[in-house]
Image: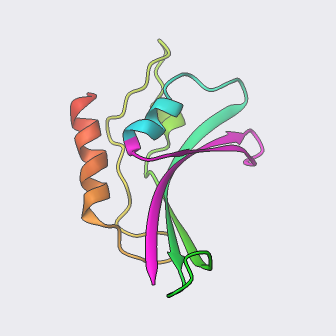
Amino acid sequence: MTICYEWVCEVVDKHGDRDDLLFADSFADAMRYAGHAPDVGYTYEIALWRKQYAPHDEGDLRETQYAYLETAVSECWVSNGTASVAGVQLPAEFDGGARMPKKFIDEVRKYVDTHK
């Protein structure tokens, strides 16, 4: 079994539909995608995507789980068009119950601490 993780910045329209997915290697890169005010009627949601593959066949995706930031990036925008990341954090578990690896919690915390 192989487990991979990838950051994704989702562009979400006013109906809650995902209009685009922007994949990133790090939380900082995902935040750069969301680094400007979204178009009118759209918001950004950043999530960590957990992909579990079957043993011996790396192309056989068996399970996916998502962990969305507990404070949506779109809720962090302030009136001057810049983002405030205060309070942004990952949940302790993915939506399917898998435990959140500490390295990703630390990655978000470090970003938040350096962008206050």
Give the farthest residue toward the top.
Answer: 80
Q: Quadrant of the C terminus?
A: top left
Q: Is residue 57 left or right of residue 15?
A: left
Instruction: Name which residue lies at 44% across and 45% down.
Output: 71
Q: In which image quadrant can residue 74 be found?
A: top right
**Front residue of this view, candidates 72 and 46:** 46
How many marks on residues?
0
Instruction: Name which residue lies at 43% across and 25% down.
Output: 83
Q: Is residue 22 left or right of residue 67?
A: right
Instruction: Name which residue lies at 69% across and 33% down.
Output: 42
- Horizontal and vertical percent position of residue 98: 42, 77
- Horizontal and vertical percent position of residue 115: 28, 28
Which residues are the magenta region?
Answer: 1-27
**Front residue of this view, candidates 41 and 113:** 113
- Horizontal and vertical percent position of residue 102: 25, 63
Q: In which image quadrant can residue 82 be found?
A: top left
Q: Is residue 13 above or below residue 66?
A: above
Q: Is residue 110 left or right of residue 27?
A: left
Residue 104 among magenta residues: no
Residue 21 among magenta residues: yes
- Horizontal and vertical percent position of residue 85: 36, 34
Give the farthest residue toward the bottom.
Answer: 55
Q: Quadrant of the N terminus?
A: bottom left
Instruction: Name which residue lies at 35% across and 50% down.
Output: 89
- Judged by its main secondary structure, the magenta piece is strand
Here the colouring is rainbow
Q: Is residue 19 above or below residue 58?
A: above
